Image: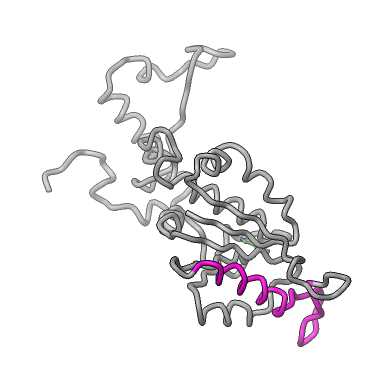
Amino acid sequence: MRIDVVTIFPDYLAPLDLSLVGKARDSGLLDLRVHDLRDWTTDRHRTVDDTPYGGGAGMVMKPDVWGAALDDITGSEVERPAHLVVPSPAGHLFDQRMAARLADDPWLVFACGRYEGIDARVMADARRRVRVSEVSIGDYVLGGGEAAALVIIEAVTRLLPGVVGNPDSLVEESHGTDGLLEYPVYTKPPSWRGLDVPEVLLSGHHARVARWRRDQALRLTAERRPDLVARLDPDALDGRDREV
Ligand SMILES: Nc1ccccc1-c1cnco1
């Protein structure tokens, strides 16, 4: 997979040199390139924004600068289609299912806007040539799209084949294929500050451990995310294997 990120704060994306994403880049599983939007400005002040038509506070990012940057980047490869991902508070809500879909794309280009946003014509023009998705990571206000891009890129990269050592670990985590929150986890020592590990986890009885974990996942999901419970497959709720 190739990922390009366009931003006026390239250093904000430095964490993508570390850990899981860094390893994916080093191993060649991920070709990630970060670009400074100001490299496409033409004035001596390297201006990327201007006042909003219709008035209002703040500044809007200029279409001509973004247009030049995205033309260069998305036009640089003809043999594979680019998917433009624009982090936006007005975007479709990012979740694990969207992460899985994005992980199947051969090429993602992230346009990280700041200020009051990017002139809407940039996305409208891009839609003439490439797939465009405006994506929100949640209902809160960020200063720009870079933090959202970091979140999305990490969630997507870990789903790429070969990136995570044990693919089984992708299943049991919160929001994994069963759609439940993850059960509580414990390690040594068996007792710590007067707090004991649940006995069942020390029993060596795998079926009981599995039942306890599922019950905990259901309890936590019902307590903390009733919205996810509504989406669960009723047959999966009791965890019993059923004849198909
Ligand atoms: N608040 C923002 C401002 C600029 C670009 C993205 C966002 C965003 C994305 N997901 C939530 O917020």
* Residue 18 image-quadrant placement: top right
Q: Is residue 40 left or right of residue 129?
A: right
* The furthest residue to the bottom: 54
Does any portion of residue 205 appear in the rendered image?
yes
Nearer to us in this view, 190 or 92: 92
* The furthest residue to the right: 44
Position above or below: 197 against 141? above
Does any portion of residue 218 appear in the rendered image?
no
* Residue 193 image-quadrant placement: top right
Residue bounds of the magenta highlight:
48-77
Q: Residue at x 58, y 36 (%)?
A: 19
Q: Residue at x 32, y 15 (%)?
A: 203
Q: In this view, does 217 lie to the left or right of 31?
A: left
Q: In this view, does 98 lie to the left or right of 57?
A: left
Asked if residue 63 is among those painted magenta in the image, a careful observer would answer: yes
Q: Quadrant of ligand 1?
A: bottom right
Q: In this view, does 1 lie to the left or right of 230?
A: right
* Count of picture labels: 0
Q: Which residue is drawn at 70% across and 79% down?
A: 63
Question: What color scheme is it?
Answer: one colour
Q: Position of residue 28 (x, y in %)?
A: 50, 44
Q: Where is residue 210 in the image (x, y as percent from the top left)?
A: 30, 29
Q: Position of residue 120 (x, y in %)?
A: 64, 80
Q: Position of residue 177 (x, y in %)?
A: 35, 47
Asked if residue 199 is among those painted magenta in the image, a careful observer would answer: no
Nearer to us in this view, 182 or 85: 85
